[in-house]
Amino acid sequence: MKTDTLLISLAMLLLVLAAGVTSQGSNQEIFLWFNANAGVLPDAFWANMTFVADTLFAVAVIAIVASRYPHIFNSGFVLLIIGALFVHGLKNLLEIPRPPAVLDADVFKVIGPVVKNHAFPSGHSFTALATAGLLALNMRSIGGTIALLVIALVAAISRAAVGAHWPLDILVGSAAGLIFALIAQKLTDEIWWLQGKGLERFAAGLMTITCITMLFHDSRYPDTRILTVAAAVIALLSLASYWRQTVATLRK
């Protein structure tokens, strides 16, 4: 199966599940069930998986891979821009409340910050699946692709475990992330000025600055500091290698 077919199939499955949740009116019921049963795993696990779905972590991962395969700087940059416009535009347009704004605090568990607004769609879920989808489109290993998608899906459902999102937010956000990964790759492949070295180096520069800020970032989720710093350091080391090669090329 081609990777794009796999991503489209998974996105359609997620949307079918979202339609089922909507038709059954079971959004709150599923949230409460999962949030309660997620406690079998430690809070630190869910907190770190939620950070895996954070935009900063996505930038670090894209930077690490793109430092070896520079064309991914271009498609990654396009994905981050169009994804941010879609997610934040829809969040502000719909203004759907999150679980802490609807449910009593004693009926579910919150790990990390309490956020009450802009539920739909889940930006973290979008980011996790969009990043995994984009990297999968540039991989040749089906095993690696499946592993990426599984990790991304766990990161997405962590948003219910930490009490931040409804299942519907997660399902639609995840599906949209996969679709936007395909769109970003298609745009980059077909629009010549999105393929240039200028955009590549501009994106690499922005990602370098972002990864530096990660060193001082407080995710507000418990026990995520080690993951945050580790991701930033690995990304910066990878970017340093990219910049050395770039400077050497420019000097020739």
Image (cartoon, rainbow, N blue to C red):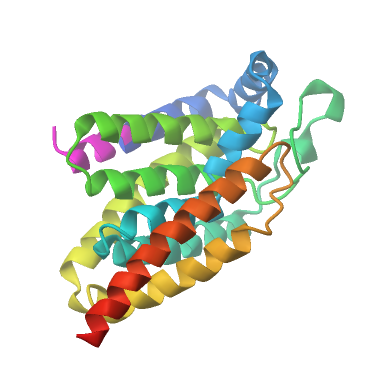
The magenta segment: 1-10
Q: How many marks?
A: 0
Q: Residue furthest bottom?
A: 251
Report which quarter residue 184 is drawn in: bottom left
Residue pictured at 68% horizontal, 21% vertical: 42
> Closer to the camera, 54 or 217?
217
Residue pictured at 80% horizontal, 22% vertical: 107
* Rendering coords of residue 19 (x, y %): 44, 31
Q: Is residue 167 above or below residue 246?
A: above
* Rendering coords of residue 189 (x, y %): 18, 64
Residue 76 among magenta residues: no
> Closer to the camera, 222 or 175?
222
* Left or right, residue 43 beside residue 177: right
* Left or right, residue 103 beside residue 24: right
* Rendering coords of residue 80 (x, y %): 43, 62
Q: Is residue 106 above or below residue 111?
A: above
- Quarter holding the C terminus is bottom left
- Quarter holding the N terminus is top left
Residue pictured at 71% horizontal, 41% vertical: 221
* Rendering coords of residue 122 (x, y %): 56, 45
Q: Is residue 132 visible?
A: yes
Q: Characterize the magenta stretch by its predominant secondary structure.
A: helix
Residue pictured at 43% horizontal, 51% vertical: 61
Q: Is residue 122 visible?
A: no
